[in-house]
Amino acid sequence: MDLMYKSTRNNEETATASQAILKGLAENGGLFVPERIPKLGLSLEELAEMSYQELAYEIMRLYFTDFSEDELKQCIVRAYDSKFDTEEIAPLVKVDDTYYLELFHGATIAFKDMALSILPHLLTTAARKNGVKNKIVILTATSGDTGKAALAGFADVEGTGIIVFYPKNGVSPIQEKQMLTQKGDNTWVVGIHGNFDDAQTGVKNIFKDRQTAEELSKLGYQFSSANSINIGRLVPQIVYYIYAYGRLMKHEGMEAGEKINIVVPTGNFGNILAAYYAKQMGLPIHKLICASNENKVLFDFFQTGTYDRNREFVLTSSPSMDILISSNLERLIYHLAGNDSEKCREQMEALAGEGHYTITEEMKKGLQDFYGGYTTEAQTKETISEIYKKTGYVMDTHPAVAAHVYQEHRRGSQDSIKTVVASTASPYKFTRSVMEAIDEKYSNMEDFALVDELSRLSVTVVPKAIEDIRTAPILHDMVCEKEDMLAIVKKILKKD
Ligand SMILES: *Cc1c(COP(=O)(O)O)cnc(C)c1O
């Protein structure tokens, strides 16, 4: 029997894994969730012995049950290969007394590569399985990292095209240059005058627009999503938490069954939700620590049970977390409500209407798995600088947000539980913020000079992803108003 997926807003709508991957979003704006979260099929001792690729197969086969063994293995082999600069794929590094799960060794040096290197293969396989003849057009809103990782994943993948929208003034110079230099005849990059939420809302509206879907289907196109709402991104992210646990057993002598904390610098709630799924599958996790930057809507939610997006949007030095509507939280809300799609839909409609909702006392009990914290801009800088001075390890702003929340949690709870911080970006991605945190004198230096200085300070090699864009030509220059996103999409596809 196949594991089926249901919409968080309508339990009547069901899909197989491959259909859910193809659609991205359910009919009425809901997200696909598995009807039950599978349990780990093997013992922790067995899982700990596996390579990343073997483990990926072992986990994904539990979720993507309508893929054949051969199909799934093909997807995994193509995804987790030499695009990653280490055979470990996701190495676990101990710094001081904390473990950093480095998720930035892929093509675009941020954790989005972990899922976006496999999504194009899952998607094209799913299309084949479902007899889809249309060309699949990926529409994506990005706060910086998803965009480049999705472009890199889909570039020149046959039968697909990709259009990425990003906030014109809301990403780092290196992030922008990474996207604007993207090669591939099937790639388009568009800056919008607006923030990430505007871009994400615009993309969601295009997905919901039936008339446009019909119009484009006649031209031989259908939309899909590479955003973290796609179940094809969520599931591959579960793998590395289990991998990290196995590394602790194998290299740190940890006993199977010992509980660990996981700290995740959070924006759209996708990465931490994957850790929550890992816990539900049976991975021994004590607390899921959700770290926010100054856009602390999730922190407030964990404190009060009220999610309220009506607030000032803050641009921070961890822009991939500058988000006020954390899309994937919808999946948690659905599970907290006892997989009740009616209740979930009501809450999400309240969020879309009044901009806030409050969960029931009963649902709040399920939040005990989580601990929410946040880090200010000043604390982010201090954390980078302190850890560098103490250990020589240079970390990016996003994991620094997480490291600080963890330090505070640890002081408060006095627990000495082994803790894994999801390290979501390489320090080479937001080099300016990182270097200015270490020493203000760097504020006058030019971007690539900073890159070389970082390499010297941290005694690490400049990643290929950065070397490649030093001299690469700009290939994209489209910019539009947030109201004009649909018009731009049509224009692109009619010309294609
Ligand atoms: C996307 C991203 C995040 C946030 O992850 P979510 O799954 O959206 O919560 C954190 N850090 C970096 C570097 C990212 O690119």
Image: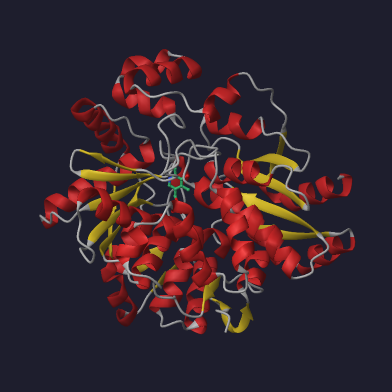
Residue 26, relative to residue 236: is it above or below? below
**Coloring basis for residues:** secondary structure
Drawn side of residue 448 relative to residue 67, left or right: left
Image quadrant in which the N terminus is located? bottom right
Seen from the viewer's position, the closer of residues 404 and 34 is: 34
Residue lying at the far left of the rendered structure: 414
How far across and down, in percent of the image, does residue 414 sit? 10, 55
Q: Quadrant of residue 382?
A: top left
Left or right relative to 241: residue 313: right
Q: Residue at x 62, y 69 (%)?
A: 67
* Residue 463 against residue 29 in the figure, above or below: above
Give the residue displayed 38% in from the left and 24% down from the top. 460
Residue 439, percent from left and from top:
30, 19
Q: Picture coordinates of residue 238 (x, y %)?
A: 43, 60
Q: Left or right: 223 with respect to 319?
A: right
**Number of disc labels:** 0
Report the front residue among 321 and 258: 258
The front one of 72 and 472 is 72
Residue name at image x 67 percent, y 67 percent = 23
Between 290 and 469, the residue placed more toward the observer is 469
Q: Is residue 376 visible?
A: yes
Image location of residue 237, percent across then percent down: 46, 57
- Residue 313 visible (yes or no): no
Which quarter of the image is occupied by the C terminus?
top right
